[in-house]
Amino acid sequence: MPALAECCERFLAYLENERRLSPRTVDTYRSGLKCFADFLKERHGIADAESITNRHIRLFVAEQNTLGKKPSSIDTWLSSVKSLFRFLVIKKLVTDNPALAVGGLKIPKRVPSFFREDQMNFLLDQPADEGTALTPEDDAFVSARDKAMLELLYSSGLRVSELTGLDLDRYYPDDLTVRVLGKGGKERIVPVGEAAACAIAEYLPLRSGYASSGENALFVSRQGGRITRRNVAMRLKNYASTHSFGEKIHPHKLRHSFATAMVSNSHDVRAVQEMLGHGKLSTTQHYTHMDMNTLVQVYRSAHPRDSMGVGS
């Protein structure tokens, strides 16, 4: 019988090398499968994949719930187990898929947290000058770079990994577009707004004085190497604090804000899906929320039987 540990390693290698999922995503799968394998070994003495039944999977879910794990975390781990067995059946490492009889958890859908357009306009309209204790040269570079990153994240709805992975030759100022490498190694071309292009144009001459020889990253640190995701998050937090922005800020919230503004203003969910690089339309549809005032205005202007609208 195939050892479960060996099966898990083959599956994780497949995700990393063939599916080309991000290291962070692969680590999420690894964490869930390890927890599942530990449960089977400690509670049921099972160390092979063929002996696992749907009852074992249900007991695993029940125990995680008893331990107080968040439903979203349990569902993620359950998805890891389901994906593992789909892989094992395809590779003929097991004969049956016990996860087929186990339904997923019903997780309440959360409306993504986002900034309103007036909040983003306030933040983006602030001057790039940071006023830190850095040298004037460093201060000018850091301020211009942070402003360019902030503008591009909001302008194009990039993931922070796409921003940090962006190279100079993937930014096309003449066309106002950028080619990014998204999840699963999928490339897409995304428009860049004029404000972001202007911010990048102000940053690039300063970049040349800091980038290490041969470094092709668009955004670099003061040390000359490619800026990291963690550094981006810290820089945005500092930028918001410097300009007295009273909301917590993180890179993905800018992506949510971009998506919300685009869906609300264009009503073209499929176009926004392409720009975000979402595999499923349902993922993009999370951004179709509107505040009540907007809903009322749409209703008043569009419904033919409303006495205050165009149909009166």
Image (tube, helix red, strand yellow):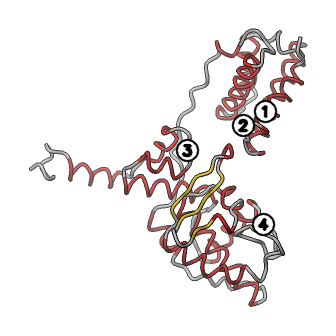
- CA separation, marks 1 and 4? 28 Å
Secondary structure state at the residue bearing disc 2: loop
Residue holding disc 3: 278
Dot 2 crowding, Cα within 10 Å, few <14, some 14–19, many 20+:
few
Residue identifier under label 1: 14
Checking the image for residue 280, the label placed there is none
Relative to 165, say whether 25 is above or below.
above
Q: Which mark is residue 226?
A: 4
- Residue at 75 percent across and 24 percent down: it is 84
Q: Earlier in the sequence, mark 3 or mark 4?
A: 4
CA gap, disc 3 to disc 2? 16 Å
- Density class for disc 1 (Cα within 10 Å; few <14, some 14-19, many ≥20) is some
Alpha carbon separation for disc pair 2 and 4? 25 Å
Give the SS element for disc 3. loop
The three-letter code of the residue at mark 4 reads Arg
Badge 2 is on which residue?
A: 19
Q: Quadrant of residue 20?
A: top right
Q: Nearer the viewer, mark 1 or mark 4?
A: 1
Q: From the viewer's perspective, tell me whether residue 262 is left or right of residue 211.
A: left
| Rendered residue at 77%/83% (across/down) | 209
Q: CA distance from mark 2 to mark 1?
A: 6 Å
The residue type indicated by label 1 comes to Tyr
Q: Looking at the image, tell me whether mark 1 or mark 3 is earlier in sequence order.
A: 1
Identity, as a three-letter code, of the amino acid under mark 2: Arg
Q: In which quadrant of the rendered view does residue 244 lie? A: bottom right
